């Protein structure tokens, strides 16, 4: 029994100081790599190269869609008595053509033309926007954070416009629900500020059978347009 125990003890060897040193150096190297790699990977995930989007050129198909759309609207304004309410049904193709038409314009509230938002309307009524945020730091001049948003819009008669966020991502990285809720609150506040103006021109808004059905007020639009001249 004692002989067996002595043989087992002799086979167990403690690591040499050199092996221990190599082990701790390797572990320290792994820790250093992780500490330096994580910030770099986060930076790469958050900041992407700034994208310059050239001016939008309309195609012959766009002109055809705009002409048909203009005729639909013109019917309500060319009659002797302008109706109080009118219905306009827009396909996703017509909406996206309108986005292209507005692509080269620059609203006062945007630091860049509309085309930089890359607005798209899908056949099921989901809108998508990509809002580029450019950092103020000079060393990040060629970088940007791209906020990707999916949302739906609707309005019932006598009620305020509703804009519902479906998804909020930064460079295709989905943000926590708490961030989406804060953005939703901000959108709701902005809509509330413009609620009277919106309701004065728009009666209802809904996606029905693949079309955006807009019930608007031609008389109110005419008064608004005349007031600006």
Image: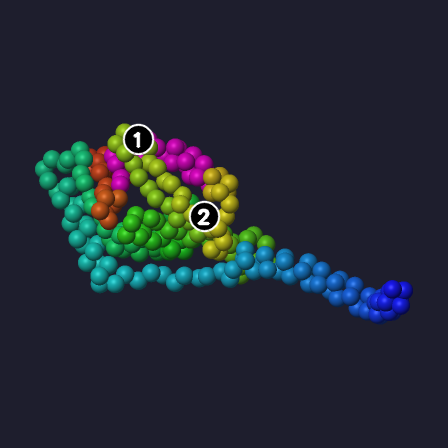
Horizontal side of residue 221 vs 37, given as left or right: left
Residue 83: horizontal and vertical position, in percent? 15, 35
Q: Nearer the viewer, residue 207 or 134?
A: 207
Mark nearer the viewer, 1 or 2: 2
Residue drawn 37% across the image and 45% down it: 151
Label the magenta part by its dominant secondary structure.
helix
**Residue count near mark 1 (Cα–Cα under 10 Å), binned few <14, some 14–19, many ≥20:** few
Tell me if residue 136 comes above or below residue 81 in the rendering.
below
Q: Nearer the viewer, residue 228 or 199?
A: 199
Question: Quadrant of residue 228 in the image?
Answer: top left
From mark 1 to mark 2, how far is it between C-alphas?
A: 26 Å
Q: Earlier in the sequence, mark 1 or mark 2?
A: 1
Q: Nearer the viewer, residue 149 or 103?
A: 149
Q: Residue furthest left?
A: 80
Secondary structure found at label 2: strand
Residue 60: horizontal and vertical position, in percent? 22, 63
Residue drawn 41% across the image and 55% down it: 116
- Give the quadrant of the C terminus: top left
Q: Which residue is mark 2?
A: 168
Magenta residues (range): 183-206
The number of discs equals: 2
Horizontal side of residue 112 vs 23, given as left or right: left
- Asked whether 20 falls inside the magenta stretch, the response is no
Q: Which residue is mark 1?
A: 159
């Amino acid at each position: 029994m004692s002989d067996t125990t002595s043989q087992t003890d002799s086979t167990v060897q403690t690591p040499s100081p050199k092996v221990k040193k190599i082990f701790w150096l390797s572990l320290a190297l792994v820790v250093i790599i992780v500490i330096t790699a994580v910030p770099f990977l986060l930076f790469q995930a958050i900041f992407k190269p700034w994208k310059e989007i050239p001016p939008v050129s309309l195609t012959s198909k766009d002109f055809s869609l705009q002409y048909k759309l203009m005729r639909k609207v013109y019917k309500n304004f060319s009659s002797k008595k302008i109706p109080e309410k009118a219905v306009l049904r827009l396909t996703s193709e017509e909406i996206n053509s309108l986005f292209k038409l507005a692509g080269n314009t620059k609203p006062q509230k945007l630091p860049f033309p509309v085309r930089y938002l890359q607005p798209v309307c899908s056949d099921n009524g989901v809108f998508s926007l990509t809002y580029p945020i450019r950092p103020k730091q000079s060393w990040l001049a060629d970088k940007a954070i791209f906020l990707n948003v999916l949302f739906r819009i609707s309005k019932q008669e006598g009620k305020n416009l509703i804009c519902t966020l479906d998804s909020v991502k930064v460079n295709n990285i989905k943000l926590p629900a708490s961030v989406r809720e804060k953005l939703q609150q901000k959108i709701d506040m902005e809509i509330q500020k413009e609620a009277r103006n919106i309701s004065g021109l728009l009666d209802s808004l809904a996606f029905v059978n693949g079309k955006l059905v807009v019930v608007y007020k031609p008389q109110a639009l005419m008064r608004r347009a005349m007031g600006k001249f």
